[in-house]
Amino acid sequence: MSKEHSHGSVGNYILVALILGVITYVEFAIVEYPQAWLGSTWTLVILVVLSIVKFVMVVMFFMHLKGDDRLYTGFFSSGMLIAVLTFIATIAMFILPRAMNYSNAEMVRAQAAGEGAAHAEAGHSAELDPAVADLIATDGRSRTAAEAADTPRPADRSLTIEAPTAPNDASTYQVDTSTPAQPDAIDTQAAAEDAAEAAAAAEEASAPDEAAVDAAAEAEDVDGADATAAATDEPSADEPSADTAAEAADDTASVAWDEAQGQQVFNANCSACHQANGMGIPGAFPPLANHLSEVHEAGGRELLVQTVLFGLQGQIQVEGMTYNGFMPGWAQLDDSTIANALNHVIVNLGDGAPDDFTPYAPGDIAAHRADGLTPAAVHDIRAGLALD
Amino acid sequence: MATTTHADHKVASQLLRRPTWRNGIGSWLTTVDHKRLGILYILTSFTFMGAASIEAFIMRLQLMRPGQQLVSPDTFNQLFTMHGVTMVFLAIMPLAIGFANYFVPLQIGARDLAFPRLNSFGYWVYAMGGLMIYTSFFLGGAPDVGWVAYAPLTSLSANPGLGVDFYMFGLFISGIGTTATAMNLIVTIVNMRAPGMTFMRMPVFVWMMLVTSFMIIFAFPPLTIALLQVILDRTFGTLFYVPAMGALPILWQHLFWIFGHPEVYIIILPAFGMISEMIPTFARKPLFGYPVMVLASILIAFMGFAVWTHHMFTTGLGPVVNTAFSLTSFIIGIPTGVKIFNWLGTLWGGSIRFTVSTLYCIAFLITFTLGGITGIMVAMPTFDAQAHDTYFVVAHFHYVMGGGALLTFLGALYYWFPKMTGKMLNEAVGKWAFAFVAVGFHMIFFPQHIAGLLGMPRRIQTYPAGIGLEVWNFMSTFGTFIMAVGLVLVFGSVIYGLRKGRPAGNDPWDARTLEWATTSPPPYYNFDTQPVVNSIDAFWADKYPESLHVERVDPAEGRKYEGSHGIHVPGQSWYPILASSAIIVGSYGLMYDNWILAIVSGFFFIFTIFGWAFEGVGGHHVHPEVEGHGA
Amino acid sequence: MSAHAAVTTHDAATGGIVTESGFRSTRLPDVKLLMWVFLASDCMFFGSLIGTYLAYHNRSLTGPFPVDVLDIPLTTVSTFVLLMSSFLMVLALHALRNDDIPKFRLWTLGVAVFGSIFLGFQVYEFVHFVNAGLSIHQNLFGTTFFILTGTHGIHVTVGVLWLLSILVASYRRPTSSKDAVYLEIAGLYWHFVDIVWIVIFTVVYLVEFV
């Protein structure tokens, strides 16, 4: 049952060593000097094959499995086999496309259609079984999304919980994208009116800094707030926004907003999913940093308000990644809260706001409360935008 | 006394001479005798089991009625976490290893394990690691993240206290010990079987321990890596489970369950082995279908690595993944079911003696089968979507692990206590204890199936009145009192038996395997002469050779296989316990960010390794036929 | 056992051997069996680390990314060094088996030296990466890369220390071919560390540039 190992000759070892060296050089060569005719797939295949050859040669000859008792081979191969199979399966679950996911309704429909066709070929009715068709239509849920959205949500007690004093995320690792903390709250309404005058003056004078200083002076008069706060505020405060902000009840061209509250609200309500740095979680929660600006630029200024008010449901693409989740609406927050939060994301997270961005004012939010949209409807509006 | 014929490294062998005490606490701290280590394992496991039972008892008291506040939610979280960790890692698995430590060498006719000091190291690392986890109660709070400790709940920002660190370090360390012992058992079983004992003549318990040991060495590394990753995240700021930087916490679930599922087979296979010893003994019939039993266990072990994602059916991996793992989970039920039929086939037509062990075996058959059935139920993703994280799952795994493993180990205790101590446990009291344990067990866990189906989630500290859960929870808690009575009776029985049990003799059960061929308890060198084997059920073949159609082996055969120096008895050593201590102290250092302590401990550990390597063979030789027993 | 007269029925298929420590059912040394069992287990250990690396591949949110920092020519050299160290290892074992003690010591030293050179390359690489902004908490690539290759590096270090201990011990106690099995198991460990590197070299370095 057991065998004495047979001693290999030095000559054999030298040969194996030479082969190993040559293979290593070949691997290096086909990577460093790629051959066009080879193509990347074949290069990959060759690399894998070559490393398997090296692996096997070291195991068989240097570790002497070839001449030794089969028991050793049994031990080692069982370990290798379990390791290779287990981790190929695991990695496959991380890498294979999300077509495997339940929530890909398109795939389900396509499959069902395919099955319907196959059924027809087999002589059965080509009609989808009504139960199956119903299943597809409702995405497996007992009620359609629209119905579900109509049902009032239970009171979300979590919103009455105090915001954590520290960000509840891995903030030690996050890139600091926030501007220095704004110390005092500025009374939005009064400041907005004053700022409107200042902005009007700015339009004529085209002196952004002056206007900012004026606005700051006004603000200072109003409630003694720190002048620097307003001064370091929106660089956009000097330009009128040509978009729908003008239609808002405030009729302001520049809006001062409460940055501290915006950050606090965002952290308390949004960061649980979208993360404090607005980077989201790939595949689960889309990033907001830079993305909201992008949506805004594509004409989605109202859409953003509607998303926050009514939620969003359905498949979307953000920065090359597919998301197919459900975002609840936050209509229970008041107008200025929502406005500050949106402003915080666009201005403070990511690369900052686009030059022509006018911060949201509470009136912008109030204007959409009566829209009465469902999350699916918001999705449809979003789909109408030219986003990639 | 310390006759060594090998050149020792002078310095090392003088630093810490290999001790030679026979009695006293020093002899226990430095022992390398597999029997003593086996007893240490068993005692330590039962102690941890007692702690875990208290934790369970408190939880059940808290859940007895709706809306109670006996313990706070935070305490409750610690209780269920520690109950799970203790039972799985510190009680049930080491109990199996303890019995294996004691009985595998005896059953294969060997004198010790292949690496006695490594055996000792495995025990001390387990015991100290377990103790370390328990110090967490006094050092800021036990871990409260569930025994599965999902990321990112275990991240530093979500869980800044030390509890999670105790979990991570404690299990990391205990795992080293378990893996070392498993490797030891594999080499022992492969290389130290008696002359004539081919693999297919080994007792089934030995086969199970061989297969279990392979599962251990393949299952523990992924857990070790996962624990290491969380330790690195918490101590050095790596990003393995930091979602904000793109990490995917589901990786923890994968790594944990790649370990976790084989772990439950690691727990149950030794129990299968014990059942396979007890039933043939008490039915006076050879095990039905020995080769199939062996093959089935190998299949279970291999397939056990292919089912882990059935713990993750509700994580949204998709229909393809769920279907694949559902299929493998169904398939693994087949060899398990085959074994049940083989045990029934062994009982059928046998002349059955209803000792306490027999009763536990029968209870095992019923309870484990029920647990297996609920297991098949949750192997269906559609059903599991309803049952996941409810008490239905809790009931399922308690039926297979409690009913499967615990009942078996109690039966094995009654079976093997006479061999380990030379005294019998009282059968009458044992039967009463069994009744309380069995009835209590079912009263605790059967209602939990119903509570789960009614929607009661796991890991909740309390539940509201008026949703139909009260009666089932009350019944379940009531059962704990009954089972507790039974366990107390067992404990009392053991204490009484140690003092006043009637003498057992070598072979009180008229059993079949080699451990019964020597005295009770065995001498420290196990057998006077090397046993030689020519059949399955080697001892039975010696007593009743005609029943197995073999010739009896000449007792003088054994002398051909002894070395001329006599029986070599391995020497004791300080290094295993010192090495374990270094690891534990170093872990405390890392946990408390005391880098000096960690580094010094690291160096001390390296020192102990060198000492271990160079202290020389040690031990001595005995000649029982000349010197008599106990020499 | 029984005292009745009996027929001797030793089963010739046993094939065992009597050693100083007692009977052994195979002619295989205990320590060599232990080492192979350990290596089988280590497959799962490195499998988990490599699996983690691959699961997180291309998921770093920020740079530096692998193509920015990995250096194929440099790593090819270090791979070659490690492969040659395995070659020296078999020479060392061959020498010891033939009782050529001076050669055994030379080649064993050679393995330790080549292993140290490999470690030197690793250290150089790590320092270079850190200077390029890649740390263990910079991004997922940093975390998984450093822990995977770092664990491998620790294995190499342990191997170097082990071989040096064998070398030093050979001067302090008589060493002969009888002790070859102890060098053999150190060799098995060393070769395993080498084949793990073969996998890492392909999976981490080479495929990045294809």
Image (cartoon, coloured by chain):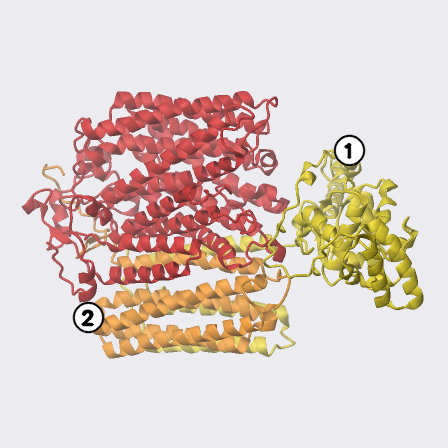
Residue A363 drawn above or below residue B608: above
Question: In which quadrant of the rendered view does residue B358 lie?
Answer: top left
Instruction: Indicate the amino acid at tag 1.
Output: Thr
- The residue sitting at 27% across, 73% down in the picture is C167
Q: Which chain is yellow?
A: A
Q: Which chain is orange?
A: C
Q: Chain of mark 2?
A: C
| Disc number placed over residue A151 in the picture, else none | 1
Q: Nearer the viewer, residue A107 or B91?
A: B91
Q: Nearer the viewer, residue B456 or B205?
A: B456
Q: Secondary structure at mark 2?
A: loop
Circles 1 and 2, Cβ within 8 Å, touching? The answer is: no
Q: Quadrant of the N terminus of chain A?
A: bottom left
Q: Residue at x 59, y 38 (%)?
A: B381
> Which of the two marks, 1 or 2, is nearer to us in this view?
1
For residue C173, the mark is 2
Residue B484 shows in the view: yes
Q: What residue is at 81 percent from the left and 45 percent from the top?
A: A335
The residue shown at (35%, 74%) is C112
The one of B203 and C161 positioned closer to us in this rendering: C161
Q: CA distance from mark 1 to mark 2?
A: 85 Å
Tell me the red chain: B
Is disc 1 surrounded by few (<14), some (14 to 19) or many (20+) residues within 10 Å? few
Q: Please, which chain is the residue tagged with disc 1 on?
A: A
Q: Are marks 1 and 2 on the same chain?
A: no
Measuring from the top left, give residue A139's x and y in whole percent.
73, 40
How far across and how far down the image is residue A270, in percent? 70, 48
Q: Position of residue B165 (x, y in %)?
A: 46, 50
